[in-house]
Amino acid sequence: IKESEKIFVNKINILGNNITSEEFIRNNLIVDEGDPFNKILHNKSINKLRSKGIFGKVKSKIIDTDDAGLKNIELTFEERPTGEIMAGAGYGSDGSTFSVGIKENNFNGKGITLETNLRLTEESVKGSFNYKHPNFLYSDRALSTSLDVIETDKLNDFGYKSSLNSISLGTSYEQFENTFFSPTLSISNESLETTSDASAAYKKQEGSYFDTSFSYGLTLDKRNSAYQPTSGFYSNWYQQLPVV
């Protein structure tokens, strides 16, 4: 048994990130400047960046320096479009429908996900807004929030009109090694208005309701890589509990 050569990371050069901030990339590196160089952890960092879905290619090159115990790492990124837009229209038994949606997976170059959707029919309006920050306030915890609004007006045909407004706030982080915890608090307000034409079931439910619920999920990730894994498994468990 003999001691192996000690190699440390001297400098990490990041190239090709015209949109994505260097700060976001460095936050996803397990091996940083000044750390002992570990090839396994270095490859894990590269695969973690590839799994974000915002880069076309991620290349790594280890460069020798004048000091045999120091290495430079050169990371080259090829960015790809991260915005999405969706629009659709149709006609069916419920009448005409129009929908539109916009999504950005790398807002402000920080890996933030923003998504908004709107769906209109002759009797309903459905809208949603979703926000997710992968590393909120450098806490290694993701922050997510969503807002949903649903309005349905069927007074003329079925004698009822309903509305549902809900908002949620949640987070996700690695509680133990390969085990992730994701709690979420949701608040909603629902109201139902009926006329004499409504069914007995709807009339019994008429009124306004306020609900608060707490949900949480546990995820066990035993994959050997977040990007194109070749072994392991991914398992999750979810539960929702009423509070008010």
Image: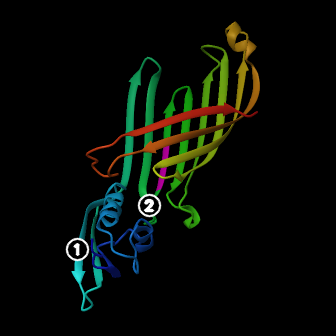
Using the rendered view, name the quadrant where residue 136 is placed: bottom right
Q: Nearer the viewer, residue 202 or 218?
A: 218
**Of helix, strand and loop, which mostly describes the magenta segment?**
strand
Q: Which residue is mark 1?
A: 61
Q: Secondary structure at mark 2?
A: loop
Measuring from the top left, give residue 10's x and y in whole percent: 34, 84
Residue type, mark 2 in image: Gly
Q: Is residue 211 above or below residue 159?
A: below
Give coordinates of residue 240: x percent, y percent.
Answer: 62, 33
The residue most toward the bottom is 66
Residue 107 appears at what percent x and percent y? 45, 61
Find residue 50 and report its image quarter: bottom left
Q: Is 193 in front, or is 183? A: 183
Q: Is residue 136 above or below residue 189?
A: below
Vertical side of 95 occupied by 79: above or below? below
Amino acid type, mark 1: Lys
Q: Which residues are magenta?
A: 113-117
x 72%, y 22%: residue: 193
